[in-house]
Image: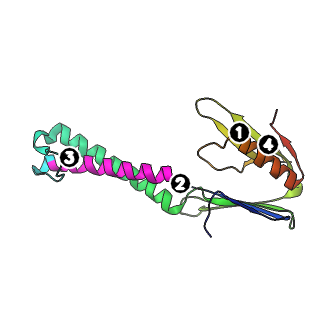
Amino acid sequence: MVLNMYSVSNHNIKVENILGSRRISNYLWASIILCGGGSFFLLGLSSYLGTNLLPFVQSSSIIFIPQGMIMTFYGTIGIFLSLFLWLTIIWDVGGGYNEFNNHKGTITIFRLGFPGKNRILYLEYSIKDIKAIRIYIHDGLIPKREIYLKIKDKREIPITRVGQPLLLSEIEEKATELANFLGVVLEGIE
């Protein structure tokens, strides 16, 4: 199943696919960091070996200690950071879906994490346990626009994607639609 940010629904079941780390910006940053880190590493290595490993840069003017050594260090850090980003993209960390099933009376939240014992996050709640749908909006330097399931035992479960915040009209529309679908109240719109 391909997971993206589109939703599928009928009268009894609504499924929202959540886009994880496989977004264009992550591909772009992982590629840029890999190119930059690889270039720094090869330039530092060139200064150590005394030969040009990069055809477009003259490494003869760079002395290995301290400049070449520092470039090799920063290049290594860049390569490892890029490797981390590529692995999160391959593993699709954060990807998953939300399923709201009025026929069964359940809400299922599924997300993928890093490989290991707890890679899969699978939460299932009864619709009867849902008190409300809550919208949290915080504008400013780091804006946050999120939708939460408010459970009767006072827990709040976030159900929106991580990353770029949704438009104000889009989040209000999604939350209103979800509250109507589940038959619960909507909180947070003033």
Q: Residue at x 14, y 44 (%)?
A: 59
Q: Earlier in the sequence, mark 1 or mark 4?
A: 4
Q: Earlier in the sequence, mark 1 or mark 2?
A: 2
Quadrant of the image for the C terminus?
Answer: top right
Amino acid beneath label 3? Gly
Q: Earlier in the sequence, mark 1 or mark 3?
A: 3
Residue holding disc 3: 44
Q: Earlier in the sequence, mark 4 or mark 3?
A: 3
Select label 1 or label 3 by which is in front.
1
Q: Residue at x 13, y 44 (%)?
A: 58
Front-most of 185 and 121? 185
* 3D distance between C-alphas at marks 4 and 3: 53 Å
Select label 4 or label 3 by which is in front.
4
* 3D distance between C-alphas at marks 3 and 2: 32 Å
> Which residue of the protein is positioned furthest toward the front in this rendering?
169
> Quarter of the image holding residue 69?
top left
Residue 183 screen position, x and y as percent? 90, 52
Residue holding disc 4: 134
Q: Secondary structure at mark 3?
A: helix
* 3D distance between C-alphas at marks 1 and 3: 48 Å
Residue 146 is left or right of residue 24, and the answer is: right
Residue range corresponding to the magenta coloring: 22-46
Amino acid beneath label 2? Arg
Residue holding disc 1: 168
Dominant SS in magenta: helix
